[in-house]
Image (cartoon, helix red, strand yellow):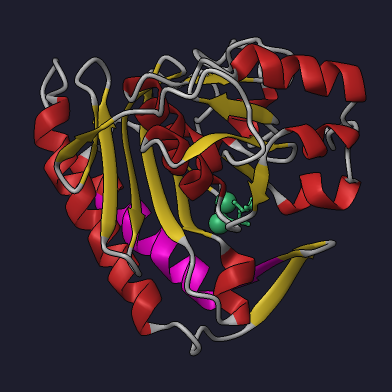
Amino acid sequence: MGDVLDLNALLGEVIRLAHEAGSLLVDRFKNYGEVEFKGEGDIVTEADKESERLITSALRSLCPDHAVLGEEFGGSGAEGAEYLWAIDPLDGTANYAGGLAIFSVSIALLHRGEPVLGVVHDPNRGWTFHAVKGEGAFLNGERISVNSHGKLSSTGLFGVSTDVISSVPLYMRFLGKCRSLGSAALHICHVAMGVFDGCVDIHAHLWDVAAAALILQEAGGRFTDLKGAPHFPLPPSSEAWRGGEMPFVATNGLVHEQVLELIDRYGSPPHRG
Ligand code: IPD
Ligand code: CA
Ligand code: CA
């Protein structure tokens, strides 16, 4: 790609790739092959793996000097890489395997630990979110922004992950109308497009969040850990480079402090480390 990376030239390729992976997932919906257990409540299908193979092999030929970190096959040289692709080939596997058509493909490029290009594609609705750092956030080519709700309210929509729900934290009752779509990337994109006031997840990873966090930031929102510290750029010592957990709060910015205070006051279970 030459010395200076042309992110806009890359963007078209990444969107095309996300669409290709999305079509593969739709084609294999309800015909996804064997299911393996990666851990308690954590499954992977053959379709997850096929989607990741498709994306990583295309990115490796497009950008041979870049490191790649995918959810299913990991990757080498990710830690501290100048350029790193973080890929979730199927965000929403539990939905997918259960026959619920809510899932996405997430592809991000990080430069020195900071997302600079992000694409989240929902093939079922035909929604493609994208952002290039400093150039705004878009849904199917139309600019998007977070909503202007200044406070959490009993009618505002708020995304919570299944892990948050199962831990039944007291703060949930103050967040508004809680929803769980089963895809962290789609949760964050719903904040970016102004539908959700915010969302919380206590067990996310780099591949879940890198693309959507950039989209959110470019849409005017805020993305931090549960104490309000920014996740990006990733510090050199961060476990996130190796796929460690990244619990997060993502909001329209205006309700962020309120959510952090609620989590601080009513507690959150420890993340898995
Ligand atoms: C999961 C989903 C889920 C979120 C978890 C993720 P997967 O990803 O995004 O909504 O709460 O933290 O691990 O396993 O479906 O790719
Ligand atoms: Ca995921
Ligand atoms: Ca996944």
Residue 138: quarter of image: top left
Magenta span:
43-58
Q: Nearer the viewer, residue 32 or 223?
A: 223
| Residue depicted at 19% across the width and 48% down the height | 140
Whether residue 233 is visible here, answered yes or no, is: yes
Q: Is 160 in the magenta?
A: no
| Residue depicted at 54% across the width and 26% down the height | 251
Q: Nearer the viewer, residue 124 or 21?
A: 124
Q: Quadrant of the C terminus?
A: top right
Where is residue 213? Give x, y as percent.
46, 29
- Side (left or right) of 210 relative to 130: right
Where is residue 148? Give x, y as percent.
42, 22
Q: Quadrant of the N terminus?
A: top left
Q: Nearer the viewer, residue 238 or 131?
A: 131
Report the number of discs: 0
Q: Is residue 18 above or below residue 124?
A: above
Where is residue 145? Give x, y as percent.
31, 28
Q: Nearer the viewer, residue 202 or 15?
A: 202
- Side (left or right) of 271 relative to 194: right
| Residue depicted at 86% across the width and 52% down the height | 166
Would you say the magenta stretch is mainly helix, strand or loop? Answer: helix
| Residue depicted at 40% across the width and 21% down the height | 217
Q: Is 50 in the magenta?
A: yes
Q: Is residue 199 above or below residue 51?
A: above
- Side (left or right) of 8 relative to 94: left
Residue 126: quarter of image: bottom left
Residue extending farthest to the front is 154
